[in-house]
Amino acid sequence: MYCLLIYQENLESAEFQTGFEGAVFMSENILERVLTRELARQIDGILSNYQYDASRLIGILLDIQQIIPKQYIPEEIAYYLAQKLNMKITNIYDCITFYGSIYSKARAEYPLQICNSIVCKVKKGERLAMDLKKILKVEINQATADGKFIIEMVPCFGACDVAPAVKVNGKVYGNLNNEEKIKAMLQELV
Amino acid sequence: MTMAVKFITKNFGRYDIRSLASYMKIGGLTALKKAIQMPGDDIAALLTAAGIKGRGGAAYPMGKKWLQARDIKAAEKVIICNADEGEPCTFKDRTLIQNDPFNLLEGMIIAGYVIEAQHGYIYLREEYSYLKSILLNAIEQLTEKNFLGKNILGKKGFDYELHLCSGAGAYVCGEGTALVESIEGKSGRPRMKPPYIKQCGLYNHPTCVQNVESLSLVAAIVNDENNIYQKYGTKGEKNSIGTKLISVAGNVKQPGVFEIPFGITIRDIIYGLAGGVEGQPIRLIQFGGASGKVASKDILDTPYSYEHLAMAGVGVGSGAILVVDESTSVIDFLITTQAFFSHESCGQCAPCREGNRHIRLLLQKIKDGVHTQADIEKLNSIADIMTVSSLCGLGQAAQNALKTAMKVFPDEFKIMEEGVKIG
Amino acid sequence: MKINGVQIEVESGTRIIEAAKSLNIEIPHLCYHPDQRIKALCRICSVEVVGSKKMSAACSTYVWDGMEILTNTKKVYDTQKGILEMILANHKQDCLSCSRNGNCELQNLCMRFGIQRQTLDKAVNPVYLDDNPCIERNMDKCVKCGRCDKICRDVQGVSAITWAGRSETFKFTTAYNKPLMDTDCVLCGQCTTVCPVGAIVEKDNTQTVWEAIQDSGKHVIVQVAPAVRVALGDIFGLKKGTVVTGKMVTALKQIGFDKVFDTVFAADVTIMEEGNELLDRIRNNGILPMITSCSPGWVNYMEKHYSDQIDHLSTAKSPQQIFGAIAKSYYADKSNMNKKDIITVSVMPCVTKKFEAARPEMTSAGVRDVDVVITTRELAKMIQYAGIDFVALAETQFDSPLGEGTGAGVIFGTTGGVTEAAVRTVYEVVMEAELEKLEFEDARGLQGIKEAEVDLKERKLKIAVAHGLANAQKIMEQIKAGTSPYTFIEIMACPGGCIGGGGQPLNTTIDGKKMRMDAIYEIDSNKKIRKSHENPEVQKIYREFFGKPLSEKAHELLHTHYHKMNRRYDFSYLDES
């Protein structure tokens, strides 16, 4: 039997395509250890802000994501939350994979989120993506070598009146219709 | 007829959005003070007389919804303000929160009074996290001055608290039951109905979900002693009373949010308020966001109202108007719209998950010019199956654009033979 | 209300699918399961409601007065077929080599609607590597019905499988797509009993059994668990709960086993060991409450989730393993055979037994106690393979010397059975008087947690009987908190006990389990000998071989030890100062 072994790295894009009959995936078995005592203390602080209430999981995950340098939720932290909140790990995994703003893969310090919905598209948002790729010399979803930037395509975030727009860690930069404005934004961030 | 009006938006720019005192100086909270002297049924009657329909897209009569919620007897009831404005091309709720947050909260408190709820939740989409501090600040100031909390304004038993919850990047969480699932800390997958959330919603309490714009109207209507609101709008047997916030974007020169009276034409909106199109002629106009129906520029002289748009084969929806010019082809427009739904479908029910997948594949075939007549039939039948049998509104509305585009632009779907379209 | 124009009357609170059933109309469904919460995910049950443009899901919509339903219009059929075709396009069509060929709900629906070829593009999901002895997950066949998730979460309380992802990446999977052994899963196999297709199935070991039988140099013996004999008949069309012991033995002989023995014999030995262990703990300040250990899914659950409390488990091996140990020692000696030439096969209602048999500590002198385990479903496959007409078979008795079982041993197959069997022996040993009423009603029935009390003059025995892991968790939380009032606890991982095991015939409902339970108690009441210590073969084996219960030899062969299962992450380093 033809058997294609693919690691979970490429999963998100691979699963979205068809024709994978016969492919066998192996989930990552490398235990990534990021939970230092200091980080655990910070997470415990966030948890007590939410009174260790498991029904506030979404807010908890978003707050934790912000204090992780690469802006994501590592697998180890998900298991730590399962223990601290007395929840099943499967419920936490479900939330992490479901919500578009909660990430399970490391990103960068400043994720540059470009809208790929129809309004920005008709305003030539693709040029914005191309320009950023050219300036930063990376592909979409590939972090720069210094870990500072990553370009992500996301659905509409309500900045249609200033299209084409980029959102970075919650702040919207609009009307980026030429390279100078894009470079100015990048300058401002660093 | 005047084009832009200021009824919902009358407070914009007139007070410091971070200061309750500044809001009260321009007359803020008078509606609340007036409302608690009135029986709840009368307030609902005011909304009915003003013909307010839910502004999130479902257009359910607001007064009727409040009366139904009021009639349900339960120890705990909940109101949710749906600020998960995820519909592409819609940014009116953002504008309301950015410019008039205290008005929104006043509307929520009045709603709490009428419906006899004890808790109000604002579900703010994660993409609007920069608006969190505005709302939290407003809630804090209102609580400080006992406009929130226990025995509000001295009314014994009127206990009401507001909470702010964040979304996390899921368009489907704009659906009522999915929103409730999200606030409960789970993935936002819509629940099956029955039970309906008005009976069994957040933590199984009776829950009433309202859009930001709907709640922002409440204070103005309560204060509107001279019925100025009713003066706007269309007249006739089926009519649309009053004003609406619309968000116009796309290939227009001045995209933005405008408050318009129902009845002005679409031409007035695009060429009058939004400054006209950018250069190329209009290809199509989509009404109501990505799940909205599509029309050609033949619709320009139709008045903007519930009944006229319905007759023209489209709808008001979220109040979004997307203008697409000829630099984008119909197929590219549909592929991008489909990509949005393929990304946002929660995936739990087979028609929506698989239907979106196959329509995505078929649209790509059409773009590549390799489709057959059988593919067009499949496209039609899958779109119909999704519309009638999906579990929630996302699946039911996802193919509105495709179905209307196939009716309005049939040439785009003709079979190709060696570069030449057949038929 | 009306269905297809026919007027009927039903109680309010009935759903459309049930109302239609009362008219003998079977509305097609996939995710619906009568013993589970309604999911309404597949939407294949969509029907037309007069007056509405949208269709309604028959499994979740309640009827109202005056409702008019149409289940046979073109719109309904086109919608149902269309959804079925879309689900089929997402399913790896591998029917001939699939273990559910001929017994698959998706196949049934396709045959019903005459779907002959696929018209949509294939869109099959990839598969994740998952290697364990009991359960096979073929995620490329999953139809996303959610039944596995519901049974793992609601009934077992383990929640090892969940829905995850969105849109085309939506699937039912484990956390981080890990193999089952790396998750909270204890391999109880309940998921394999509810999957409508071949996405979650038991590992098939029938080929190993055939090879052993066809090897002339091997002496292949088989033991059969009590719960199998009241369930096997289901697969051959007999009424649920029919007792087929005699036919089963004949079939096994025809398949080619050299000897056909009864696990019930070993169950009696288990009672001797476990009953005396309980008395020993009571009298000598041993760890109490003592918990039964014959359910391997339950043992896995203890080792994984309550590893600090594993000393509460009885050290007695399960009947399957006790049989195997006896087969490779006592039986080998008696038959003058080299234990290396004996292959023990066991037929179990359980998939976890495959894991138990493969445990490193379940060997004696380098030889496995039990070599191969097959489930009730796999036995049915072997019977079909051999072309045996099961229903027409004559009855045969079990072989000697390991085929004699008492009524006490037979009731092991249902929840409360181990307790009742233990009480029958322990009472007579302690009180040195005959137990008049053998039926221990307090331990019987399908209630989740049952409590009972037995007055032994030296002490009152407070007993709890739990089945289903969600109920087991409640018991364990009490023990963890130190507030458990019990002396002896019986826990079975599967709801209903072994009669509802992970290896039993598919889609057994709660009603079916009740019928099997009644059948087991019937076998017991028809037995001449109903107490384990009165089994002459058991008395013989102690006389000739073990000496007495808990002797050194008994400890060596019939007892075992447990260990903590490693969890994926251990955060205790954070608490160290």
Image (spheres, coloured by chain):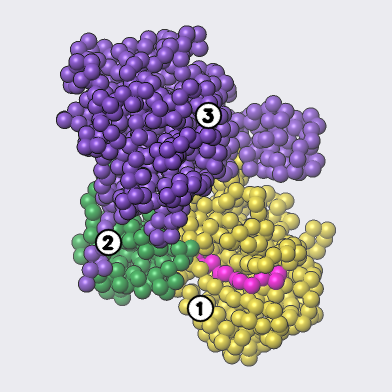
Chain colours: A green, B yellow, C purple
Instruction: Give the letter of the chain under mark 3.
Output: C
Q: Position of residue B341 (x, y in %)?
A: 50, 49
Q: Position of residue A118 (x, y in %)?
A: 48, 55
* Quadrant (top left/top right/bottom left/bottom right) for the C terminus of chain B: top right
Q: How far apart are marks 3 and 2 (CA)?
A: 48 Å
* Quadrant (top left/top right/bottom left/bottom right) for the N terminus of chain B: bottom right
Label 1: which secondary element = helix
Compared with C493, C524 (above or below) is: above
Residue at 20%, 20% (x, y): give it: C333
Q: What's drawn in magenta, residue-wise?
A: B115-126
Q: Residue C521 carries which label?
A: 3
Q: Distance between the residues labelled 3 and 1?
A: 65 Å
Instruction: Give the letter of the chain under mark 2.
Output: C
In this rendered view, identify the residue nearer to me: B101 or B292. Answer: B101
Q: Amino acid type of disc 1?
A: Leu
Give the residue number, with chain letter if any, for mark 2: C571
- Say which of marks 1 and 2 sits in front: 2
Q: Amino acid type of disc 2?
A: Phe
Crowding at mark 3 (Cα within 10 Å: few <14, some 14-19, many 20+):
some
Give the residue number, with chain letter if any, for mark 1: B136
Q: Amino acid type of disc 3?
A: Tyr
Label 2: which secondary element = loop
Label 3: which secondary element = helix
